[in-house]
Amino acid sequence: DTGVSQDPRHKITKRGQNVTFRCDPISEHNRLYWYRQTLGQGPEFLTYFQNEAQLEKSRLLSDRFSAERPKGSFSTLEIQRTEQGDSAMYLCASSGGGGNYGYTFGSGTRLTVV
Amino acid sequence: RKEVEQDPGPFNVPEGATVAFNCTYSNSASQSFFWYRQDCRKEPKLLMSVYSSGNEDGRFTAQLNRASQYISLLIRDSKLSDSATYLCAVPMYSGGGADGLTFGKGTHLIIQP
């Protein structure tokens, strides 16, 4: 599979629990992005990595959110003490550099906090 | 002005018609612009990139107007399968978007038989 893979596809969790999502980018892409999308909205930028370095974080990314890309390959996004407002689709995208070719998105992880 | 603004629609268009919608942006330093297509409950997929005045791919044409800071998407001979949400994306900073893209809310298009 040469696309961007995300796991799990769906996650239902109780408020207050921690959740972790995984993203495997296209192997030759050195840039990886996390976005969040809610119904009726466009994707909102959360953070991005160039190789293993996290270069930008949105103000949307509160202290409860943390992202890692330890070896410059796959990435994880963890949300601690989930809240109902965290319910959204979490999208991962990768880019080959320069960004001039747009991003390839994964299928997303749909999080529902109950 | 909002960073990226789109008319949410919906645009209801008969099959075979031509439809166009615009996207305005505030970052005058942007060098690249993107149109994504998103089907219901699916991920966005890159439709077209625009780096200069415009780009054409089959029935789809994207135009860039730097002076007025908007890009447009024109769909000719629309098909039922064109029904989707069309997202406009603009680099968060200058350049091509390597540091992140800002997306509009999308324009919902419905092609009617």
Image: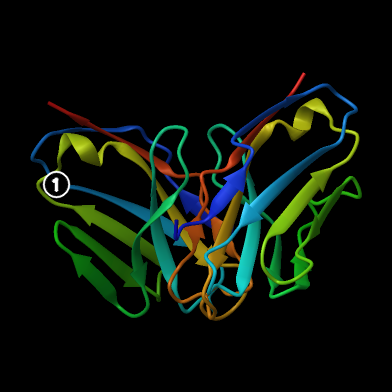
Which sits in the foreground, B82 or B22?
Answer: B82
**Image height check: is A35 above or below B99?**
above
Viewer can see residue B69: no
Badge 1 marks a residue whose secondary structure is loop
For residue A22, above or below residue B113: below
The N terminus of chain A lies in quadrant = bottom left
The residue at 68%/75% (across/down) is A50
Mark 1 crowdedness (10 Å alpha carbons): few <14, some 14-19, many ≥20: some
Find the residue positioned furthest to the front.
A1
Q: Give the quarter of the image for residue B109.
A: top left
Tell me the residue at 82%/21% (across/down).
Answer: A14
**What colouring does the structure picture have?**
rainbow
Q: Residue at x 56, y 64 (%)?
A: A94
* Residue at left offset 11%, top offset 34%: B15
Chain that bears disc 1? B
Residue underneath mark 1: B18
Q: Residue B42's spot in the image, x, y percent? A: 45, 38
Q: How many marks?
A: 1
Give coordinates of residue A44: x percent, y percent.
63, 50
- In the depicted structure, whether residue B14 falls above or below residue B7: above
Q: Is residue B108 left or right of residue A62?
A: left
Instruction: Give x and y (percent) for residue A81.
Output: 91, 34
